[in-house]
């Protein structure tokens, strides 16, 4: 079946992006070492652009056997797939399977031919015929292998673009179809523009947006005085709760190779806008002294370097779950931000974020998601905020999430609920791309009967990964300032009430009437 | 005298870095420059002290073009003369205008304006009592702390860190590249404890806390004096411009760089401000992250945590009056000594020589801690008094809240406005986390009888800021 002409691709840029994505991956992987080989030791040359991880291992058979279901799923999630993507995957997988079989068969013939040639040494005619056959076989195999490689090079990028499956309970539709599954905290305060965090912050000298606009640009900021102390207190507070819940602390690099981000599933949903800051390649010095660095990007979330921490590892199921909490800084170009969203601290280009990340067995990921949710609820309840938990609908899941819970806090100055947290169960989406696996430390029960007969090796399976926000500092600051602002009789801001839970982590002096602990 | 041909400029790149005025843009990209006014330098001072300032620049190994000072003096002379000429001609022009209206028109051409040498920003400062020469000529001003442990490769922070599962360099090499790292477990807690500890001491000494953006316009960094000494190697990561979306929805962002030190956004916080002298000093401590391309790092330096591409740094910054900057430098030094003494480290304070001063520093103190695993002293802190170098470029000024005494007699006669003068700025490291971690691990490592690493001793000063459990034999508080 011929490939549909480019004009039938639903979203021209997805053609660019699919091909671009494919090209990037192909360029990287074609220069890549074969799987399993050691990285070259580099001394004076540039570091390689790719991470040198093996190619992602996707479940093609699953895709090929469920074309309708997965097409429907991709449609519900508004994933930008080329027309007929799933059918093409099935077809290419079929071709791959057939070519592999043919190659196997011919190789088998090739191995027996050698014996027959030796056996017919005394019969020059049949020997010559056999030699001809052998030569033809060699050419045919070479041809088949080249075709196989071609099929694989088209199959992988196409399959990579297919989003993860969706949990059956997830609502279908856009953001407005999110389902509130819980509400916590006190009755929300009435909306009130005087509680706007920007005016409260200015009145109390807690932030400086103007100086940051001069120094860097719009949507950058300084936190001053108690504002800075609030960031640090929130980080310390949330981190201590995460540690109490068994998450081990990690500091992460805020810069990664773009390949790693892609393997985590970071493909912009809205194709026209890029969220990512790229770092320009260093100019090599004329005397050859400056090593150009690999292509690098600033991360939009510590989820990415945390996932990368586990790349290419094989655990035993006793090792799991691995639960870490990462202290990182998120950098987002937010090029599409408009209006009220882009004001103040709500949608900024850099912010501190504490991120939870877990690697677990396939059977335990749903329970792990609930465990993360309980920790996040405890963190936010301790801050005394009104908030709700939402089961996010299909169009909000991105590429990697099987299910996603968002938490929103009531922000009376903004007069709306504002997202403060997000948690995703990515099942094996990231694990297949980053090669995060485990072997069961004992064989599964169903094979125990047969184990007496033969030693069956236990195979490696792909783990499940989850990530969730422990603390997104500016969003929490907005909620705390807008809810905690204190006014005098004339309606002027005179101070702010902060939750006592933060007090043990407060580095400044506790005196003065500006702060009150409630 | 004709301008020297480009091949005689010792620094080609300084020619490229000609100032360009920022255009005001609304729906288009934000302007690349900060839109601050041009730096205001003291040209007369330079022109009247050519010999002295040439000598100073030579001592500091500042890479100036040949004859730079003489050219500054000459161009300043030209500027003065041309300004006079323009005034004269403007006056003529205005009278001509009347005459034109009064009679038949007589076209008068205007003179071409100056081609002033604004390219030339000769960074020169007065120096007193600073050692002359390269890094090896630094003068040890003080030594603090216990007797240094003997050098011992088994104390190497990388092996100690690996043995105790405190850091992961290999995963970071896969995820990002060489000289990046993860801190794990107690390693991560150590970073946070160091930040909390140093910040609380700085606050106690009157520095107000600030969080800073780690990204700035390159113009701001330049105004702080960040010109790479070695032109062949760039320390700075640049952020590639965003590609504008086809539907025009994505606004391209201005040219941006990652900062190598929070000093830069802290200085920027005070840009274009006029204080009263009662407002001063302004003392802030900034929590930021330093990003350095470190393209020239080699050998032992580039190993482990010593020279990494990203690290957390707490930075002190002060704006003060001209008379008080030397005392402020000593005040910063006392705070830094207190921070490091509290960590129980052996360290020394160095008065850095001319070739280490960079463009902006009038005087610089470095502190080095003894790192027995590396078998050498390693820099953990740096403090610079930049006098008015940054203030002139960032327009940080103050007015005396009362007029200076010498004019009081004349004040009875006329109201003389008090003029604004440029402030002095200083910056110093409160805590450079990886360097302190190296020193703590290498000094505090504990071994069993076989020589295996079994734990680490940490200073009790960090204990109140420790978020993890205090149990277990791995950590010991001393």
Image (cartoon, coloured by chain):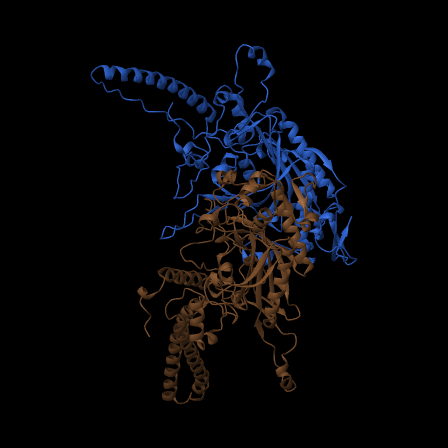
Chain colours: A brown, B blue
Residue lying furthest front: A489
Residue A185 visible in the current orientation: yes
Relative to residue B169, is residue A398 drawn left or right? left
Is B387 situated above or below B187? Answer: above
Relative to residue B193, is residue A355 drawn left or right? left
x and y percentages locating residue A41 in the rendered image: 55, 58
x and y percentages locating residue A155 in the rendered image: 42, 70
Q: Residue at x 44, y 60 (%)?
A: A269
- Viewer-proximal residue among B373 and A387: A387
- Viewer-proximal residue among A409 and B75: A409
Q: Quadrant of residue A286?
A: top left
Total marks shown come to 0
x and y percentages locating residue A161 in the rendered image: 44, 66
Is A446 situated above or below B298? Answer: below
- Viewer-proximal residue among B462 and A204: A204
Residue lying furthest right: B449
Q: Quadrant of residue A138?
A: bottom left
Relative to residue A454, is residue A219 drawn left or right? left
Q: Residue at x 37, y 26 (%)?
A: B115
Residue B434 visible in the current orientation: no
x and y percentages locating residue B238 in the rendered image: 48, 45
Which quarter of the rendered picture does the N terminus of chain A lie within? bottom left
Residue lying furthest left: B104
């Amino acid at each position: 079946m011929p490939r549909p002409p480019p004009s039938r691709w639903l979203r021209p840029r997805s053609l660019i992006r699919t091909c671009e994505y494919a090209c990037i991956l192909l360029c990287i992987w074609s220069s890549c070492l074969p799987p399993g080989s050691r990285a070259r030791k580099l001394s004076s040359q540039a570091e390689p652009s790719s991470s040198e991880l093996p190619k992602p291992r996707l479940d093609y058979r699953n895709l090929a056997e469920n074309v309708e279901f997965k097409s429907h799923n991709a449609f519900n999630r508004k994933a930008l797939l080329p027309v007929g993507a799933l059918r093409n995957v099935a077809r290419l997988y079929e071709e791959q399977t057939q070519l592999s079989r043919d190659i196997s068969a011919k190789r088998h013939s090739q191995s027996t031919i050698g014996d027959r040639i030796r056996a017919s040494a005394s019969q020059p005619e049949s020997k010559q015929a056999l030699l001809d056959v052998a030569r033809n076989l060699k050419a045919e195999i070479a041809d088949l292998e080249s075709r196989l490689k071609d099929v694989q090079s088209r199959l992988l990028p196409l399959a990579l673009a297919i989003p993860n499956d969706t949990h059956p309970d997830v609502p279908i539709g856009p953001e407005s179809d999110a389902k509130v599954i819980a509400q916590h905290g006190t009755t929300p305060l009435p909306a009130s523009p005087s509680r706007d965090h920007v005016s409260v912050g200015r009145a109390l000298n807690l932030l400086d947006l103007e100086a940051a606009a001069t120094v860097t640009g719009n949507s950058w900021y300084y936190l001053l005085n108690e504002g800075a102390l609030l960031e640090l207190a929130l980080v310390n507070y949330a981190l201590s709760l995460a540690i109490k819940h068994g998450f081990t602390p990690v500091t992460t690099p805020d810069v990664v190779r773009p390949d790693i981000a892609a393997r985590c599933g970071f493909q912009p949903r809205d194709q026209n806008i890029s969220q990512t800051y790229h770092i320009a390649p260093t100019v090599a010095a004329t005397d050859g002294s400056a090593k150009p660095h690999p292509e690098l990007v600033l991360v939009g979330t510590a989820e990415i370097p945390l996932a990368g921490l586990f790349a290419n590892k094989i655990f035993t199921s006793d090792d799991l779950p691995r639960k870490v909490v990462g202290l990182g800084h998120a950098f987002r170009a937010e090029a599409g931000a408009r209006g009220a969203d882009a004001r103040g601290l709500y949608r900024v280009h850099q912010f501190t974020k504490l991120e939870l990340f877990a690697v677990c067995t396939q059977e335990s990921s749903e329970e792990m998601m609930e465990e993360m949710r309980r920790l996040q609820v405890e963190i936010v309840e301790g801050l005394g905020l009104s908030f709700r938990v939402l089961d996010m609908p299909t169009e909000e899941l991105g590429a990697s999430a099987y299910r996603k819970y968002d938490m929103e806090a009531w922000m009376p100055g903004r007069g709306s609920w504002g997202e403060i947290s997000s948690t995703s169960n990515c099942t094996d989406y990231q694990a297949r791309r980053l090669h995060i696996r485990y072997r069961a430390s004992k064989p599964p029960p169903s094979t125990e009967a047969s184990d007496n007969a033969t030693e069956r090796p236990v195979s490696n399976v792909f783990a499940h990964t989850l990530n969730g926000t422990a603390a997104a500092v500016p969003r929490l600051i907005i909620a705390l300032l807008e809810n905690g602002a204190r006014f005098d009789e004339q309606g002027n801001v005179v101070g702010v009430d902060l939750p006592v839970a933060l007090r043990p982590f407060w580095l400044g002096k506790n005196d003065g009437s500006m702060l009150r602990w409630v």
